Image (cartoon, rainbow, N blue to C red):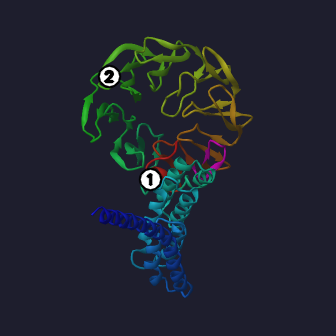
Amino acid sequence: MKRTKRILLGLACLALLVASWAAAAGAKSGADRQRELMGEAKAYTDDGIYILAVPLLEEAAGYQDDYTLEAEAALKAVYLNLAEKGDFERRYTSLLDRQMARKDAAPEIFQEAARYYLEKDKTADALSALRDGIAKTGSEDLTELYEKSRYAFTLSRDFYQEASEIYKGTCRVALDGRWGLASSSGLLSIPCEYDKISAFDNDRAVVQKEGVISAVDQDNNRVALLHEEAEDFAAFAENRLALKTAEGWALANGTFRTNGVVFEELGMYRDGYAPAKQNGKWGVVDNSGGEWLIEPQFDGVIQDELGSCGDPEALFVRQNGSVFLWRDGQEAGGPYEDARPFYDGWAAVKRNGKWGFIDPDGVEQISCRFDEARSFGQHLAAVRLGELWGYASLRGEVVIEPQFLEAKRFSGGNAPVRTELGWQFITLLEYKGGGGLF
């Protein structure tokens, strides 16, 4: 009996050993099988018989062994040769997706995907693949390709006679001398029926029609009416409005309630501050109108077309015919011939008849070589070379060639540009694909 048990135990060990040998042999045969299948597939592809190579290469790629990547490369080539038939294009992109999803995916896979999508005019997909590849691999080659590709754009079909800069996703636009509001991509949201309209903020826009000043919501319903007398109104932002009365520019809120503070002039609020003029001099006032962040002491404060002075911590002021950068209570740069307010880090300045860009410390970052420029918005700045406008990157490279009669700052991936048809809106394709790196 004991002898029988020993025999059975020995047989069990032998069976286990044989099973181990078989598993090892099977692991080896996986690579051998891959080579065999790839050899058979090559015979077909050499004769241009791609359809018969597909199942062979799909089986070879299914083995997780030595030749998997080689089998996948051959399979992708076959899919591309059959892309015009059946669902082989989808199979190709699905395989690319699986390869890019691997933890050890090589930069070349992301580059292959990006180039394929660029050739197919699927720029948003290409940019998405590049962003993923850069995040996963940090490849400089992918970053360079991304920089070359990221500035593709579409142009809206809607056009207007006038358009302002974009503010909080909306833009003031005009048709036939009447004003309304459009989205940042150019789609009209409040019809052009007013003599004047403000930017949209705090769930409303201030409008004027036939001398009546009121406020409307996003559906163009009246939500407030000014009962007191006022000649005009200026920029509305952060629930602060400048109303022109007989006494001067009164500070009011979105329901036209004033607090008794009056200025000679008042700009647009941003981050709780606005440029204001009192006793013939300009400074920066807080949102109550009662406290001065910067005392009125300058001949002027540089503002954008909406009336904002940008970052109050890095302000451009006019004094004695020149423009200076003002920080921490003193001059920090200049003199300049002109300047634009700071947005997104760098500001445009003019010296010797040309425009360039400085940082908030007054250090020149892009030399003055443009005929005209606006400050940066979303890592791009509108620049003019000769008669036409384009856009420059933070590297100082013109990445959207000059082709517009006029151009304004980017916001939310969009910017108003003037063409021969009027004001239209360009949208960077990278924002259609889920947002850019910046």
Q: Is residue 9 left or right of residue 95?
A: left
Label 2, label 1: how far apart the Cα atoms are:
49 Å
Residue at 70% in and 25% down:
334
Q: Earlier in the sequence, mark 2 or mark 1?
A: 2
Kindly identify the residue that appears in the image at 51 percent across and 71 percent down.
Answer: 31
Residue 95 point in image, percent of width and height: 45, 65
On residue 229, the disc is 2
Q: How many numbered marks does the figure carry?
A: 2
Give the left or right position of residue 206, taking residue 399 as reference. left
Tell me if mark 1 has few (under 14), some (14-19) or many (20+) residues whose alpha carbon lies within 10 angstroms of its own: some
The structure residue drawn at horizontal position 26% and vertical position 29%, both measured from the top left corner, is 224
Looking at the rendered structure, the secondary structure element under dot 1 is loop
Instruction: Classify 246 as above or below 175.
Output: above
Closer to the camera in the image, 248 or 73: 73
Q: Which residue is label 1 attached to?
A: 433
Q: Mark 2, mark 1: which one is toward the viewer?
A: 1
